[in-house]
Amino acid sequence: MSFGGYIKAFGKQPGHPYHAVWIKNDIKELQRFVGGYVEAVDITDDITVLCNEDGRFWEMPHNCAVCGIDFVGPILIVGVEDEEMTDIPEGAIEFIESNTEE
């Protein structure tokens, strides 16, 4: 459950492992994390990966592939419910880790 406008997410920087983060559910904070404009890529009905919309244009380093989708630059994995970002769902971390290729 989110707390005070913050959501529990799962972040990953290129070349580093995933880590749990509490991040303010605010566009400026999300942009700061991904390093620019935010693009949302749905992985499942309740899991979305947030990445830098212009990451390929800016030649950001390869991060990983999640469920067969390649990402560059920092990514943030959040939950989604009724089109609103929420805490990452229970069990999602294990699902993401088992479906990630470096």
Image (spheres, rainbow, N blue to C red):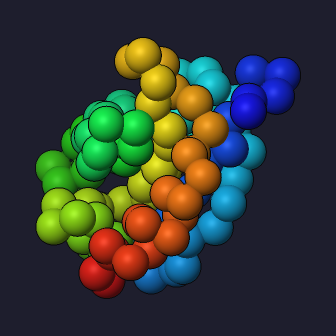
Residue 34 image position (x, y, % from top left) = 46, 46
Q: Quadrant of the C terminus?
A: bottom left
Give the camera-side residue of 45 and 37.
Answer: 45
Residue 50 image position (x, y, % from top left) = 39, 42
Which residue is at 68% across, 44% downward?
8
Which residue is at 36% across, 31% downward?
37
Residue 88 image position (x, y, % from top left) = 57, 45
Which residue is at 74% across, 30% downward?
2
Give the camera-side residue of 11 and 35.
Answer: 11
Compared with 60, 21 (above or below) is: above
Compared with 21, 98 (above or below) is: below
Q: Quadrant of the N terminus?
A: top right
- Asked if residue 31 shows in the view, the reply is no
Compared with 89, 56 (above or below) is: below
Image quadrant in which you'd find residue 26: top right
Extreme-right residue of the structure? 4
Left or right relative to 40: residue 77: right
Left or right relative to 37: residue 84: right
Tag count = 0
Which residue is at 17% across, 61% downward?
69
Compared with 11, 87 (above or below) is: above
Residue 79 image position (x, y, % from top left) = 50, 38
Image quadrant in which you'd find residue 30: top right
Left or right relative to 53: residue 94: right
- Asked if residue 100 shows in the view, the reply is yes
Image quadrant in which you'd find residue 68: bottom left
